[in-house]
Amino acid sequence: MPLVTLQPHPAQSVTAGLSLLDVSEDLGHPLESDCGGVAACNACRVRVISGAQNLSPRSAEEVPFLDDEQQRLGCQAIVLGHVVVRPEPGL
Ligand code: FES
């Protein structure tokens, strides 16, 4: 099972195939979400510290919300393996 670290919380095992947004809710440290997970609010954005290759590829819908290559929208990034992220919501 993948280990997900949602800084500043410790790493926890999660089920592969869920979005970072869903994982964050399961772990009790929910990312912000104002749009219900449809890539429309930018509140769930995170900075990927390590393990970017263990997330699904960027979706076309999320790219306009990202400032650089290390950011992802939590609702669009599917967890496939170990990853360390830090919440970095957009305004
Ligand atoms: S929850 Fe709104 S963009 Fe991800």
Image (cartoon, helix red, strand yellow):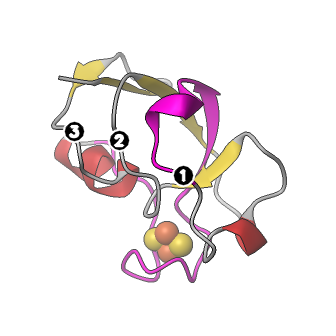
Residue 79 has which mark? 2
Mark 3 or 1, closer to the camera: 1
Residue 90: x %, y % from top left: 71, 64
Q: Check if mark 3's residue and mark 2's residue have beta carbons within 8 Å.
A: yes
Give the magenta-colored segment's residue range.
Answer: 29-57
Which SS type dominates the magenta stretch? loop
Q: Residue at x 46, y 48 (%)?
A: 56
Instruction: Judge from the rendering whether residue 38 lies leftward or rightward of residue 27; answer left or right.
Output: right
Q: Residue at x 58, y 35 (%)?
A: 86
Q: Nearer the viewer, residue 21 or 28?
A: 21
Can you say whether 3 is above or below 55 in the image? above
Mark pair 3, 2: CA separation? 6 Å
Three-letter amino acid code of the residue under disc 2: Val
Q: Is mark 3 within 8 Å of ligand 1?
A: no
Give the SS element for disc 3.
loop
Instruction: Classify residue 48 by image quadrant.
Output: top right
Mark 1 crowd level (few <14, some 14–19, many ≥20, 10 Å Cα): few
